[in-house]
Amino acid sequence: MMRKKAILITGASGEIGQALINSLAQTSSLPLLTLDLHAIPPELLRLCTHMSGDILDHKLLARLVTEYDFEMIFHLAALLSTRSEFSPELAHQVNVDGTLALFQVAAEQSQRRGKPVSFIFPSSIAAYGLPTLAMKARDRRVKEWQWNNPTTMYGCNKLYCEQLGIYYSKHYQQLSASKPVMLDFRSLRFPGLISAYTVPSGGTTDYGPEMLHAAAQGRPYACFVREDSELPFMAMPDAVTALLQLAAAPAESLSRSVYNVTSFTLSAADFRDQVMGAFPEAEVTFEPDWQRQGIVDSWPAELDDTAARQDWGWAPAYGLQRAFDEYLVPNIHERYQ
Ligand code: NAD
Ligand code: SER
């Protein structure tokens, strides 16, 4: 029986997954197979074949391998940073063991096809860990190889999986007599992402999008970090563009396997000001949770994305003002009307 060619998206019911399905379905000639613990919104069902299931279910993955020939895998399934701190061992299972299982699928399929399976993996600013606010101010704009000292389980998981991906794409079975065809691993370190259509949960950058979505619904919001907390952010359409551009980039143009990408940096107070500008009735207060604050303080204020710009032409379409004025505010407004 011929295996069906497809693109696999794990974690497809999540924020990035939903946005990615919409974009990829318009451009890809291959069918999309999506996998998630949860169902996907009904309007996306016509764009993909969805399977409800767990990436830790080895029998399920084995069945997929016998039925499908994956050209590309977008491996998005994960527990995000705050949730991972509450269940670190579960996070390790999903974020590391689950990713390892997907690497094995891609490695096996690359060998069988005699052609690399593309493996696209979203990593995070959580891979960084700055020890103090003074260091965060001094080394404001971090390069990929600086401060790889995460303080969270999620950050450790992301950093290790980046390394595992590099291993599977460059050194897998390095002592065997014949050199196997290896998978093609590419990863992006994203800042906090903000979607107009979905509300995040379980992350630490969530205060930004939560503030905006609460204001649009006329609900008061108590922000869980200090006003001066700074992090980099990006609008969701740019995140999807980055994933698709990196996936399409010619291998010879890539000088790295893991790239920073970013768009704009703002403090929580700047975020409040943007929100108040769009929704003047909004009620935003600051009630820092010192434990979550500690995580935010350890993440860099800016990412240096020079390598992505040089190697594959990365440039965000949505800077701060355009993100709010043309993407976030009008679409969120419409959503809650
Ligand atoms: P999300 O929480 O909205 O989506 C994650 C999805 O993974 C969920 O739908 C969840 O049901 C699914 N999932 C979790 N465990 C699973 C399992 N065992 N089996 C199958 N599915 C499972 O998160 P997101 O924002 O869409 O993030 C997607 C990816 O991008 C993650 O790897 C995340 O770490 C990464 N990322 C996100 C951000 C951000 O700000 N949203 C920033 C950097 C990196
Ligand atoms: N937005 C994500 C989180 O806060 C970062 O990867 O967990």
Image: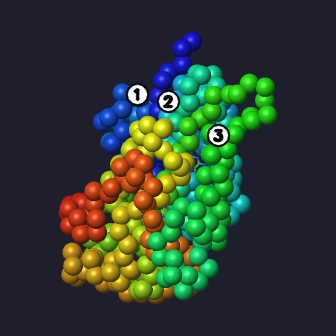
Camera-near label (3 vs 2) is 3
Answer few, some or many: residues within 10 Å of disc 2's Cα (few below 14, many 20 plus, some between 14 and 19).
some
Q: Are marks 1 and 3 in contact (CB under 8 Å)?
A: no
Relative vertical location of residue 123 with respect to residue 270 in this rendering, above or below: above
Which disc number belongs to residue 71?
2
Residue, disc 1? 30
Corner quadrant of residue 274: bottom left
Question: In the rendered image of this protein, does residue 252 appear above or below residue 85?
Answer: above
Q: Residue at x 36, y 52 (%)?
A: 314
Residue at the image position 48 percent from the left and 44 percent from the top: 254
Could you give the CA–CA distance between mark 3 and mark 2, rounded to whole angstroms?
18 Å
User: Between residues 90 and 236, which one lies in front from this camera angle?
Assistant: 236
Say whether mark 3 is within 8 Å of ligand 1. no
Which residue of the protein is positioned furthest toward the top in this rendering? 1
**Could you tell me residue 133's position as x and y percent?**
54, 84
What is the quadrant of the C terminus in the image? bottom left
The disc placed on residue 170 is: 3
Query: Where residue 94 sits: x, y (%)?
Result: 64, 52
Question: Which label's residue is closer to the chain start, 1 or 2?
Answer: 1
Q: Please report the residue visible at 36 percent of the width from the left and 64 percent of the height from the top.
A: 263
Report if the beta carbon of the residue with label 1 is closer than 8 angstroms to ligand 1.
no
Q: Amino acid at mark 2?
A: Glu
Q: CA distance from mark 1 to mark 2?
A: 9 Å
Q: Quadrant of residue 149?
A: bottom right
